[in-house]
Image: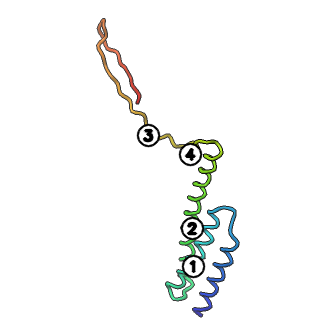
Amino acid sequence: MRNRIINTVVGLAIGLGAAGCATNTGTGALAGGAAGAGLGALATHGSVGGAVIGGAIGALTGAAVGNAVDRENEERAYEDRYGYPPPPPRGYYGPPPHVVYEYHEGPYGGYYVRRYVY
């Protein structure tokens, strides 16, 4: 029984790995899921539950790594095409500016304020 499950998982891993996807996210999810299922089955001595849990964890991890690779490739392609890095993602504003206020006494009394932004 154990050899049958292991052979099935290895066969699926080879089949899905050969199929691939259009993006690294999909390919990473397939490869991670197959590897996780195989490792889960081995760690639990052929248990189907272990293979399912390992496959799910492997698929999530593989998708996360593949997504990071896709984003890096997009940034690199943008920089190669336009010669400068891409703009920051929407909703990102960076740190607030450093503002300094100086209060000075005016020549005819009263105060005025100078504002410097660094």
Q: Say which quadrant the C terminus sits in.
A: top left
**Foreground of the two, 39 or 113:** 39
Q: Residues within 10 Å of mark 1 (few under 14, many from 20)?
A: many
Q: What's the CA distance linking mark 1 and mark 3?
A: 43 Å
- Quickly name the residue at label 1: 37
Tag 1 secondary structure: helix
Q: Quadrant of the N terminus?
A: bottom right
The residue at the point 57 percent across, 67 percent down is 62
Q: Residues within 10 Å of mark 3 (few under 14, many from 20)?
A: few
Give amino acid for label 4.
Answer: Pro
Q: Which residue is mark 2?
A: 62
- Count of numbered circles in the view: 4
- Residue that mark 4 sits on: 89
Q: Amino acid at mark 1?
A: Ala
Within 10 Å of disc 2 (Cα), the crowding (few <14, some 14-19, many 20+) is many
Residue at disc 2, secondary structure? helix
Amino acid at pointer 2? Gly
The numbered mark, 1 or 3, whose residue comes first in the sequence reads: 1
Q: Earlier in the sequence, mark 1 or mark 4?
A: 1
Q: Which mark is residue 95?
A: 3
Which quarter of the figure has residue 13?
Answer: bottom right
Say which label, 4 or 3, has the lower sequence index: 4
